[in-house]
Amino acid sequence: MVAAVSVPSQAQTVLRGRLCDPAFVHSALRSSPDTNYSKLKYLVASSVSEACNNSVLLLGPRGCGKAAVVDMVLDDLRKEHPDAISVIRLNGMLHNDDNCAMKEIARQLCLEHQLSFSKMASSDDNTEFMIDMLRECGLAHKTILFVLEEFDLFAQGKQRLLYSLLDAMQSLTSQAVVIGVSCRLDADQLLEKRVRSRFSHRKLLFISPSLDDIQLLVEHLLILAKDSGLPAKYITDYNSRLTSIFSDKKFKGCLNSLMDADATTSNILRFLFRAVSYMDVESGFPSIESFLKALSSMQRQPKMDSLQDLSILELYILVCMHRLEDKEQSSYNFTSIMKEYRSIQDAYKTSDKYASTVCFRAFEHLLDRELISFGDNRGRNQALEYRPVKLLISSRELAQSLKLNTTCPVVLQKLFDRERYM
Amino acid sequence: MSQLVTPRRATRSSTADPVSPNSPSGSRPKSTPRRQPVPTAAAKEEEGEHERSTVDALLEALPGRRAQATDLLRLLAPAPALPLLLHGGAATGKTRALLLALRHVRPRPRRVAYAALRSLPSPRALFASLLTQLSPPSSSSSSRLRIPDKPSDFVAALRDALAGLSAQGEAVYLVFDNLEVVRSWDKGGQLLALLLRLYDLLRLPQVVLVYVSSATPDAYYSMTGSVEPNHIYFPDYTVDEVRDILMRGHPNPKLYSSFLSVALKPLFRVTRRVDELVAALEPLFRRYCEPLGDLKAVPDESIKRRLFEHIQPHLAVALNETFSVPTRTSVDECKDRSSGGKASSKRRFGSRDGLLTELEFHMSVSAKYLLLSAFLASRNPATLDAALFDSTGGSDNHRRKRKSSQASMNMKDTMAEEMLLKGPGTFPLERLLAIFQCITSVSEDYLGDVECPDSMMNGSGMTGLMSDVLLQLSTLCNSNFLSKSRSCPLEGSARYRSNIDEDLALKVARSVSFPLSKYIYRR
């Protein structure tokens, strides 16, 4: 159908593939010394080669590359010691039930060692199986690596899995390394006393990258190398344009405002993905506009957008609710809002006087948009008109939206402002 | 250069959908390429053309959604792609835009699995739906799929199914529609966290996840979120966009546009949702065309003015109702219209700001009296019953007007506020029956005047009303006019509450000629 994919779309595909591949994103860490990657690698490699047990926790906020570092270390070790490692992966969100986790461990062990797995085995059977396997693998000088993601979720409840795992590691014959990954910085404080005593308190802390690191990361991700499979002339043009964009003040301002909100790597990746997708395929080169457009689409305010989408009657209801709140009525419901609405209509004689059913429909639209909500927790079995409601937007947002709304009647603006000066 | 490109352009435009007028002119300036070797220029041309015609075809089908459609096409194709979240109000066209974009996206996706979360009752049903859509069609008949219960089993089964599908290198799209209903499911929080983290858990580069939600993205921020999806926002349509949408494909555009110029703006002030506007505009347009004999006529100024005057009162009525169910009375009125036109419409629209004053449905007389007594029982405090319903059955002896002090007036105000807040009160069954008996004894005089052809009914008019009261009561409860509330802890008898508002009660009272306003306790 399509004869050939054009060069810019090829470049786009290559870039998008890079941004979605965590191994590529963090591959720059391989070369730099004294990073968490090198520390973890040293730790695991030494326990594999020296046949000893170890445990380590990787802690840091979300999106900082903890799981990516673990994957990189595991890939390297598989290349270096192909037969000496088997990996068991558990996730705290999926396997937080101890029985379920044991079953998963048994299943993965069976898969690795080509044994048949019985689904009917009980939890005790699975635990025994795991201990036996640990002993066997230890005698065969094979290390089992347990990767526990969402470690803090395993530490809820009785911590039976953690205890049995760490306890099994205490015996002389087993060789196992437990790598825990968690986003809670106090994950080790959650452990019980007996579990904590068996845990070596090694922690690797991950922090969000600084501005310079981000600059280097962006260059690493977007600059095309010579061997990307694209024509050389295009690559040189592309790289020169990109470097000129990087030195542009607007781009630096972009990155700064992005980092002010959220400085994690995953946020930067999202921004770059969007900017690369907005790249103009006809001209074929990136431009500063695509970066600015990506930034503006990431920095929307959803409640303000919803407020701009309201009809006039819905705005009336919001203003009535705001007036009731200003009058310091602690709780009010739809009937009191209607009373306020009718008093406004009687006072100002606007053309926007509607029946109660129509107003109730507008009220329900506001509930759907989650700009207002009920104040009680499904308390009594009451009709909707009598349940207390409250506003979920601040008065500043309401004021701003009334100003921005071009079709808003003047009387509404007056009603909103007037109460401040009463 | 141009000869190479023109034949292709001709064939594509002839096979494509009706192309909007700006597309040929839009593509023509691009046919001046730079001085480059011919094949790559032609290929680039064709690629650009192809993309533009894809975008144009999509934009044709989605009016007023230019920015969102281009965003969708750019962010969805080619895989790998970060997850995507489409959010916006109801009836803004999110699902439709997404499904159309998936049809137009290039390269074509291998499979699109669509989970409509609003129609799935439980997590297990969701797992079943997704797995059946992803499994190859041949095996589903031979072996019954084991539907997983736990999330971990589901993720493993999903990974197996997807690995089998995406081996060829084409993308597989998983669409989750109406994500906000998962919040109200049992254990919905866990499932929501699982769905939003599916990208991390699966780690398959050819799988693209798309979420559609009518709640804003800040409803989904939680501690377990990992890869935040890219957002695309669908704003509501403006007046002009709604007008374009409604005008599409109408057989008589000039007539319809003159109608819309009259009717759309006032209705737009009430609601901006296209589905509600369409429901309100359709009967109005029928009324608008009534004076015109020929529906295909093109109106001029004088006709337009006449039609506008005709539609004006109906528009005022339409603004005040949510939906209208045509009843027999309205059909009869249509018949009357030919004879006594203006007078009847004035009577119909003149009172109470254009609301209908008659009851729109039929109820038996005893049910009407029961409803009125329930309304009075909920509305008035129990201590007033003796004064209102004495042996004469009416409040002929008026309440003595006492000069009220400031303190008691303040107390009355606060009690009025409380009544607004708390809603209608509850009453036991005995009180309801007592009030019922009182007011039916009052109305016996009125009913006695009614001509009864059946002689048996003459003497026992009132006992006819008293029978089957409990049956009527249960009917009223089922139709939600009354509701049963918690029984009193001391006595253990059932208590009821009336759910109707004052307008409906007045309508019912007017239909049986009962002076309700004399009995309502107003503070």
Image (cartoon, rainbow, N blue to C red):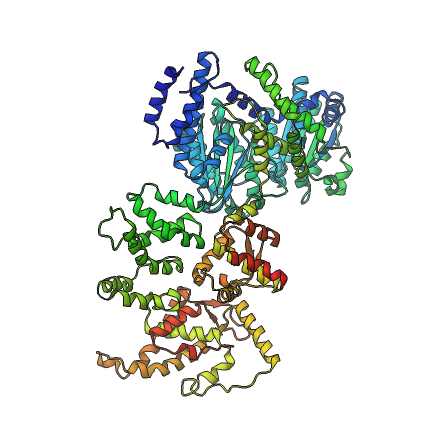
As displayed, is residue B112 above or below residue B502? above
Nearest the viewer among A117 and A29 is A29
Instruction: Point out residue A76 in the picture as x, y percentages from the top left corner.
Output: 67, 20
As displayed, is residue B329 above or below residue B510? above
Q: Is residue B166 left or right of residue B302?
A: right
The image quadrant where one finds the N terminus of chain B is top left
Nearest the viewer among A196 and A295 is A295
Instruction: Point out residue B517 in the picture as x, y percentages from the top left corner.
Output: 42, 77
Nearest the viewer among A178 and B310 is B310
Query: Residue A145 sits in which quadrant?
Result: top right
Query: Residue A136 sits in which quadrant?
Result: top right
Number of on-image labels: 0
Is residue A244 visible from the viewing direction of this image?
A: yes
Nearest the viewer among A279 and A288 is A288
Residue under the point 43% across and 59% down: A358
Q: Is residue A277 left or right of residue B136?
A: right
Instruction: Point out residue B280 in the picture as x, y percentages from the top left corner.
Output: 37, 53
Is residue A86 visible from the viewing direction of this image?
A: no
Instruction: Point out residue B361 in the picture as x, y percentages from the top left corner.
Output: 33, 65
Residue under the point 51% across and 81% down: B383
For this orientation, the residue located farthest to the front is B301
